[in-house]
Image (spheres, coloured by chain):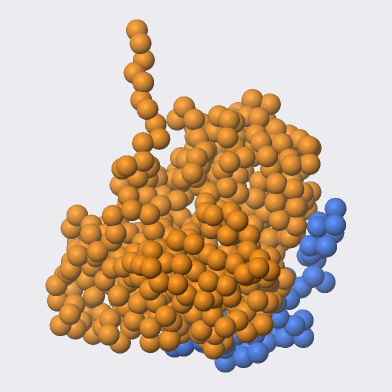
Amino acid sequence: MSADGSLDRLKREGRIVVVGASLAGLRAAETLREEGFAGSLTMIGDEPYEPYDRPPLSKQVLLGRATADRTGLPRHRAIDAQWRLGVPATGLDMAARRVRLADGDEVEYDRLLIATGVRARPWPQEDEAELDGVFVLRTRDDADALERSLAQGPRRVLVIGAGFTGSEIASACRERGIAVTVAERADAPLVGALGGVVGEVAAELHRKHGVDLRCGVMVTRLEGDSAGHVRAAHFSDGNTIQADVVVVSLGAQRNTEWLAGSGLGAGPRGIACDAGCRAFDIRGIVTDDIYVAGDVARSPHPLFGYQFLSLEHWGNAVAQAETAAHNMLSDSADRRPHIWVPAFWSSQFGVNIKSVGVPSMGTEILIAQGSRSEHRFTGVYGYQGRVIGAVTFDQTKWLQFYQQLIETTAPFPPAFPTVDRRPEGQQPMPADFPDPSVPTHGPTVTLSGYAPDDRRLTFTPARH
Amino acid sequence: MRLVVDLNRCQGYAQCAFLAPDVFAMHGDESLLYNPEAEEDRREDMARAVAACPVQAITVEANSLDGNPGTDREIGR
């Protein structure tokens, strides 16, 4: 490509558009400038704010130790961009290389990076979702509104969904002395991401800290008072609880609707791309000018059987953005693959939970160190005789060791005698993940393709 | 002054919490809580905390007087 000078021209005077002005978009923009891109750079974001950090929103901010308007991401360097903030992208014309904006404007590009991320899944009953006191938690505005509501001292908070965010919210409420009920459809908190064996520990943590944890139930209806404020919730087991704040924490939806009809391979599971972050079109052909990064991307990973992984992980957004930006400015031979090993953290009830690899692919788990009853342990996940993931509760210093086992496809169960191996850690046990076709709040890693019962495509053979 | 900690890297050594206790605090044995926007007069302590982190997990925004035009000009367009 650079043989004809087009790459040099792109770097000198090209137009790059980044849709999505959050962590991935910002780090990509910085990398583009770092690597010598001198052309015009446009950053499009649907929120009116410059890029900010989300992890503190469910932790520091809800604890009242930081305010939501002060989580702006530090800049590594100036990016000299034209910002279009508070204006969502509404369409893509791949042939004309144009992004349409909600205000009617169109922005032309030579290279496009899509980093539109995910949004909180709303409560499905619209009239109930609109009641005062019903929240989701994803954005700066969400966190601000929820924190103000917690500061008013509600009598009881109901958290619907015990994934990571839901559990962190419950933890913050307890720390503030607020009564909280958590309703989870699965048998334990965190089961989608970590399985039932670890979920049991999470359930203990909730209860030990005074959370009224209800598992195996669904919330069937939210009820408001005459002033339109939520006051009660009805459960599938026939129970009703009174709550004046409800936080809907049912996982995320990928922001791909704006690409409908564009011809890009974008859908409810994200935007498929190759290992070099180039987006596929709907025919499965890789594009050469459209790249994807962050939560909205799905890319194949050799360590995990080339499954297309969608990772809602902070570190993935950073690493994928840097790779995408590098590749946007590179010849094919100089491009790098994005083969980051998934890793995430959560902090709840004073316990540091961290994970590497893809635990939800695991069928077995071994408690390799520590003890579940002490809430301080390392769980190693096995899949087809190899180590596929690991989780630590307050044992983060061990995680890197297990990451190496994952990266080297070490055998499972790991053969070494470790320090602090307990009787309960002598034998692997079933990791106890729920059937993926049964909806829960969902894991933070989405494995390839569609659920088995989710027939979205009909294959029609070509006729000769 | 804005800061961010890469909590994938953070292993809870707590060096930052010793050096800048008004910005960083341990929450439980291992979890780190930090104020994502520290006061400008904490810059010296912050530099020490950044340097002392064994896993180099802390990023602090460059001093705007040191050649980073910052964000206002960009945002204001």
| Residue found 57% across the figure and 92% down from its top | B18
Q: Give residue A460's quadrant in the image.
A: top left
Asked whether A235 or A371 is in front, the reply is: A235
Asked whether A144 or A275 is in front, the reply is: A144
| Residue found 15% across the figure and 82% down from its top | A423
Quadrant of the snapshot with the N terminus of chain A: top right
| Residue found 39% across the figure and 77% down from its top | A213
Residue B43 image point, x, y percent = 72, 82
Residue A18 image point, x, y percent = 67, 46
| Residue found 19% across the figure and 83% down from its top | A422
Check the image and name the residue furthest to the front: A226
Residue A66 image point, x, y percent = 66, 79
Residue A419 image point, x, y percent = 23, 83
Question: Is residue A403 in sight in this rendering?
Answer: no
Q: Is residue A7 above or below residue A212?
A: above
In this rendering, position of residue A426 left or right of residue A94: left
What is chain A's hue in the picture? orange
Asked whether A221 or A96 is in front, the reply is: A221
In this rendering, position of residue A451 left or right of residue A144: left
What is chain B's hue in the picture? blue
